[in-house]
Amino acid sequence: MKKPQKMERLAYRKIGDETIILDTKINKEIHQLNEVASFVWELCDGKHDVQSIIQKVCEEFDVAESVAVEDINAIIAELDAKSLLTDNSL
């Protein structure tokens, strides 16, 4: 996934540092994202590629890129596996 984008059908709300996502169409589930996953979710706008998301996470949370790469890729892969994202680079 090069430029992840939130699926339009989803309702979501940020509460404090976390985000709650309501998927009423596909999986009929509620998802709760922690602070870092919420930050990544906000950047999944179809404009940021995965590398720029990693860079922004590194800046925001003062973490080395070598540490962030695996975690951010895992977050994006999990969101994609739950049908919460689409790829805007196609």
Image (cartoon, rainbow, N blue to C red):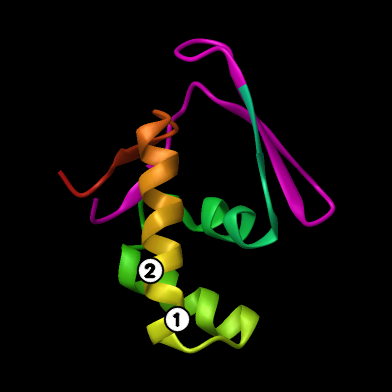
Position of residue 27 relative to residue 60, above or below, is above
Label 1 residue SS: helix
Could you tell me if the residues under marks 2 and 1 are in contact, i.e. CB atoms within 8 Å?
yes
Q: Position of residue 2 (x, y in %)?
A: 23, 56
Residue at 37 percent of width and 38 percent of height: 80
Q: Amino acid at mark 2?
A: Glu
Tell me how many marks there are.
2
Which corner quadrant holds the C terminus? Answer: top left
Residue at 62 percent of width and 62 percent of height: 36
Position of residue 83 relative to residue 42, above or below, is above
Kindly identify which numbered label has been placed on residue 78. none
Label 2 residue SS: helix
Q: Position of residue 7 (x, y in %)?
A: 43, 31
Does the magenta segment cover residue 9? yes
- Which residue is under mark 1? 67
Cα separation, mark 2 vs mark 1, equals 7 Å
Q: Amino acid at mark 1?
A: Val
Does the magenta segment cover residue 85? no
Tell which residue pokes out farthest to the left in this image.
Answer: 90
| The residue stretch that appears in magenta | 1-29
Position of residue 41 relative to residue 59, above or below, is above
Tell which residue pokes out farthest to the right in this image.
Answer: 16
Crowd around label 1: few <14 · some 14–19 · many ≥20 (10 Å): few
Q: Position of residue 78 (x, y in %)?
A: 42, 43
- Which residue is under mark 2? 70
Residue at 50 percent of width and 10 percent of height: 25
Crowd around label 2: few <14 · some 14–19 · many ≥20 (10 Å): few
Residue at 56 percent of width and 12 percent of height: 28
Task: Tell me if 3 is positioned left or right of 8 in this view.
Answer: left
Task: Tell me if 27 is positioned left or right of 88 in this view.
Answer: right
